[in-house]
């Protein structure tokens, strides 16, 4: 049972399975983003394990559901979505360039499994665990969820005796690590384009972003005008690299711009960050007793860690967890760290910017009045970019003119539109008071800090008087 795949038509489910595979015999789930997702036998062996099912207990957006109530989707459904899109992408390339590129069943299966398992090693609360919590408890030890995903894959194969070629597992791990600082040397000299599909370390365009941008936007009730189908239907491999039609330049720009908008409005929302700062403090206070960070090098223990750690702390009677429990109770009762103010770091200061600390603010208070302590203040240094820091991500993408052309080339942004941004990174400094009665004092110290560093108040406006009086 097969299906004809035409580039002008939407994807057919049968295009993601071998021509001889009967869809009636396939397991499938209905996804609210992609519709029916058909699961191949090897992928099912990984899905039906306690290690993969753990992803149901990891909310994709961590604590954002406390601000956007609909954002309760999990890494489980995101992983299924990436699995499906990875299969669609490789099948699309096979349909149009399969003979030319030598794409075989091994390649198709490896890409799909990499999409499925790319987040299996993810930590609790979205990226809070590895970016906010672990750096405070590890002394310069580097850890990334991509590396844990690779370690967990080996663990799952060993524990569940999954019959899979060792070469395929090696290739899957290479694909997952391709965009991380732990990237492995690629075992395949040819078919380098396969590493562009799931986690694209070359230019950042991958099916992981295709899925979470659409999924997160929908869950939060936000519009999303970015259409990944257009890119997947028209992409082409030239010189062992996935390239895009020149006329799709603005569609690709919209991918990065939409991602940046999600970071600004959802992922780093000021209230979301307030809750995250409180959860980090709760985890830090509980860490020595619960040894939360001790499992990060042991896959057999790490898979047991998920978002329910908060409920564990909240319901435990142990006196050692009292401070952590109190913080979680404050979150439940919406007694959050109070947002005082923020400023965007001036463009000419971005190059040499150093993270602002609570100590910096505490040391900027004037004599007299309330004496602020460092632990009265929380600071969030928020970086928002288009995936490549201060660089334009589109400069690392190659395009082609039409399907008759064999030439690939970059496109300088000034040749497309003068309305596109010329700066690709924002740095926002936010300051919070951990106690409502200290908002006025913290706000004043924050203003003094800005005057000391920049000679002016970089914030847009003063902290509202109503907020200063709210306690």
Image (cartoon, rainbow, N blue to C red):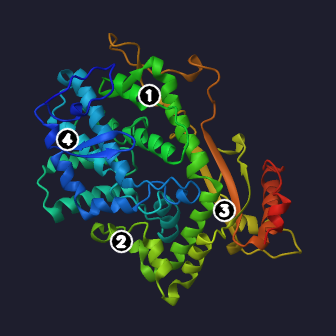
Tell me which corner region of the image, top left, top right, bottom left or bottom right, holds residue 103: top left
Q: Secondary structure at mark 2?
A: helix
| Foreground: disc 4 or disc 1 | 4
| Labels 3 and 4: the sequence-earlier one | 4
How far apart are labels 1 and 2 at the CA level? 39 Å
User: Of marks 2 and 3, which one's residue comes earlier in the chain?
Assistant: 2
Query: Mark 2 highlights which residue?
Result: 295
The image shows residue 439 at horizontal and vertical percentages of: 78, 67
Decide: few, some or many residues near mark 3? Use Cα within 10 Å; few <14, some 14-19, many ≥20: many
Bin the neighbour count of mark 4 within 10 Å (Cα to Cα): few under 14, some 14-19, many 20 and up.
many
Question: In the image, what residue occupies the spot 46% across and 61% down?
Answer: 130
Q: Are marks 3 and 4 in contact (CB under 8 Å)?
A: no
**Residue 190 seen in the figure:** no
Q: Which residue sits at x=54%, y=45%?
A: 221
User: Answer yes or no: do the residues labelled 1 and 3 have beta carbons within 8 Å?
Assistant: no
Q: Nearer the viewer, mark 3 or mark 4?
A: 4
Which part of the image, by quadrant, shows the N terminus?
top left
Left or right of 426? Residue 103 is left
For disc 3, the marked residue is: 379
Question: Which element carries disc 4, helix, strand or loop?
Answer: helix
Residue that carries the numbered disc 1 in the rendered image:
397
First in sequence: mark 2 vs mark 4: 4
Q: Position of residue 110 (x, y in %)?
A: 22, 42
Report, in whole angstroms, how far the alpha carbon at label 4 lies from the one at label 1: 26 Å
Q: Which mark is residue 109?
A: 4
Query: Which quarter of the figure has residue 274?
Result: bottom right
User: How far is disc 2 from disc 4 in space, using C-alphas?
Assistant: 31 Å
x and y percentages locating residue 321 in the rendered image: 51, 83
Spatial CA distance of label 1 from label 3 is: 36 Å
């Amino acid at each position: 049972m097969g299906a004809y795949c035409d580039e002008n038509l939407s994807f057919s489910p049968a295009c993601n399975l071998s021509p001889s595979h009967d869809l009636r015999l396939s397991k499938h789930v209905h996804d609210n983003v992609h519709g029916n997702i058909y699961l191949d036998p090897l992928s099912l062996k990984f899905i039906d394990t306690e290690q993969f099912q753990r992803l149901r207990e990891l909310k994709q957006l961590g604590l954002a559901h406390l601000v956007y109530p609909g954002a309760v989707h999990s890494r489980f459904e995101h992983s299924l979505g990436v699995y499906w899109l990875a299969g669609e992408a490789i099948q699309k390339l096979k349909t149009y360039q399969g003979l030319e590129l030598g794409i075989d069943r091994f390649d198709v299966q490896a890409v799909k499994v990499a999409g499925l398992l790319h987040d299996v090693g993810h930590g609790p609360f979205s990226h809070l665990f590895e970016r906010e919590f672990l750096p405070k408890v590890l002394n310069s030890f580097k850890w990334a969820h991509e590396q844990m995903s690779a370690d967990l894959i080996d663990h799952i194969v060993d524990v569940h005796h999954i019959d899979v070629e060792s070469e395929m597992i090696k290739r899957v791990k290479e694909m997952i690590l391709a965009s991380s600082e732990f990237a492995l040397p690629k075992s395949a000299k040819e078919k380098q384009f396969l590493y562009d599909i799931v986690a694209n370390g070359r230019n950042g365009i991958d099916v992981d972003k295709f899925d979470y941008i659409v999924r997160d936007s929908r869950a939060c009730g936000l519009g999303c005008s970015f259409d990944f189908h257009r890119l997947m239907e028209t992409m082409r491999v030239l010189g062992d690299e996935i390239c895009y039609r020149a006329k799709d330049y603005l569609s690709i720009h919209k991918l990065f711009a939409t991602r940046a908008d999600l970071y600004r409005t959802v992922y780093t929302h000021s209230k979301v960050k307030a809750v995250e700062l409180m959860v980090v403090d709760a985890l830090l206070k509980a860490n020595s007793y619960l040894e939360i960070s001790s499992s990060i090098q042991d896959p057999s223990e790490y898979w047991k860690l998920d978002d329910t750690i908060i409920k564990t702390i909240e319901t435990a009677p142990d006196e050692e967890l009292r401070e952590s429990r109190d913080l979680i109770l404050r979150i439940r009762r919406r007694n959050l760290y109070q947002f005082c103010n923020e400023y965007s770091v001036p463009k000419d200061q971005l190059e040499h910017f150093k993270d602002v600390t609570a100590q910096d603010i505490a040391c900027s208070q004037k004599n007299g009045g309330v004496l602020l302590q460092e632990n009265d203040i929380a600071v969030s240094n928020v970086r928002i970019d288009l995936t490549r820091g201060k660089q334009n991500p589109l400069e690392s993408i190659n395009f082609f003119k039409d399907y008759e052309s064999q030439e690939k080339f970059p496109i300088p942004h000034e040749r497309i539109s003068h309305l596109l941004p010329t700066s690709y990174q924002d740095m926002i400094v936010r300051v919070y008071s951990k106690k409502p009665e200290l908002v006025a004092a913290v706000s004043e110290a924050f203003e003094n800090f800005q005057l000391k560093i920049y000679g002016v108040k970089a914030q847009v406006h003063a902290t509202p008087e109503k907020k200063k009086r709210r306690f």
